[in-house]
Amino acid sequence: MIESPPTESASEPQLKIELAQVCVVEGIWQDEPDHLAAFDETRLGASGNAQTAARGRGSLYLLLDVSGDVEGRGEVERELIEIIRREYAARRGSVTFGLSEAVRAANAHLFEINVSAAREARRMAGVSAVVLRGPDLYIAQAGPSVVYVEAGGKLLRYPAESDWFTEDQPLISPQGNASPPLGVRREFTCDLAHTSVNAGDAFVLATRSLTQLSNTDELAHAFADRGAEDIATFLEEVASGADLSALIAELIDPADLHPASADDEELPAVPIDGDEADETEAELHPVFAAQATTPFANGAAEEAETPGENFARRREERRQPRAAQPAGITRVAGGIGSGVGALIAAIAGVFSGALN
């Protein structure tokens, strides 16, 4: 459902994006996960004509939640992300149409893999695909996935309700309030939404486990007036060892950034702030691993900082690599489990009917 008409304006605000991530899969921290990706406009197209076609398409953010064995999962995730990137970059016309067709192509690819695979080897996937173009945020979703948008002091959840968010009722049926995951049905449509954002806002792509770890009111309080790194720290604390993946994007007014320096060039590039594009291939840039080094208790000291000093301090903290797996991060048996992997039994009948 499209909530509001998109703003097609030539004078779009040039927002900067600060990215952070939280990713625990099968009880293990993932610093460079295959199922999270961020592409700025210059890196959507591979080269030549593809780069030209991708101009004006905005920046693309992706989160996948692929079920099944760990072995081979990364390859499937990379393939699906590449298909969505390539198909969206090549599409003409509206962003909404391009996103829906890109997700449809990913579904077709995973469905064909499942057709030729043994039943026990079949996979399904939840997906959130988000495009930021100027002040417009476009969202395409399928299966178990969630996007939170903190805009204008209000937190919105997409979708607002879904059977995927109910731990004991993750069923898919024509009467159910749940969109189908990738890879289960040949005929496929995804859920679509649109909203507007501005500097100071943030959005979070997450696996369904976040809806069970914390309710929307708690998240609204935690996200308010906090940056990407602080939100990531909060999510790490909420997860407390449970499997959770989240890609956090903070929208920043360029006036709040500290002046460029030589040190900045040594940092991993975030493909949102106009870095020079690689003309030979599109690069998938893993987002920064979230650091749990900025406790919220530092509020008084942080208030004394200028916006530029605060931003510079948080970037420096992010540069410090995670020294070791945090204590208490072990594989979680039962409960929420690892994303959609715990739901395979619930949809076995759907696979059987659709693929056989």
Image (tube, rainbow, N blue to C red):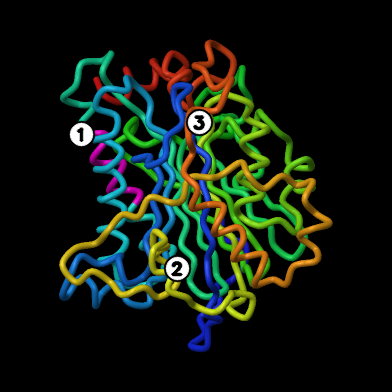
- Real-space Cα separation, disc 2 to disc 3, in angstroms: 55 Å
Taking the spot 27% from the left edge, 48% from the top edge, the residue there is 105
Q: Of tags 1 and 3, which is closer to the observer?
A: 1
**Image quarter hosting the C terminus:** top left
- Real-space Cα separation, disc 1 to disc 3, in angstroms: 23 Å
Say if residue 117 shows up in the picture. yes
Q: Of tags 2 and 3, which is closer to the observer?
A: 2
Magenta-colored span: 103-112
Taking the spot 43% from the left edge, 13% from the top edge, the residue there is 345
> In the visual, does 64 lie left or right of 254?
left
Question: In the rendered structure, are the residues bearing label 2 and label 3 in contact, judged by CB atoms less than 8 Å apart?
Answer: no
Q: Position of residue 84 (x, y in %)?
A: 31, 52
The residue carrying mark 1 is 112
Sequence-wise, which precedes: disc 2 or disc 3?
3
Q: Which mark is residue 306?
A: none
Q: Position of residue 211 (x, y in %)?
A: 64, 34
Residue 152 image-quadrant placement: bottom right
- Real-space Cα separation, disc 1 to disc 2, in angstroms: 47 Å
Question: In the rendered structure, are the residues bearing label 1 and label 2 in contact, judged by CB atoms less than 8 Å apart?
Answer: no
Q: Mark 2: give few (<14), some (14-19) or many (20+) Cα within 10 Å.
A: few
Q: Mark 3: give few (<14), some (14-19) or many (20+) Cα within 10 Å.
A: few
The residue carrying mark 3 is 174
> In the visual, does 9 lie left or right of 300?
left
For numbered disc 2, what is the local secondary structure?
Answer: helix
Look at label 1 and name its amino acid: Glu
Front residue (pair 263, 345):
263
Query: Magenta span has 208?
Result: no
The residue carrying mark 2 is 263
For numbered disc 3, what is the local secondary structure?
Answer: loop
Q: Position of residue 236 (x, y in %)?
A: 61, 36
Sequence-wise, which precedes: disc 1 or disc 3?
1
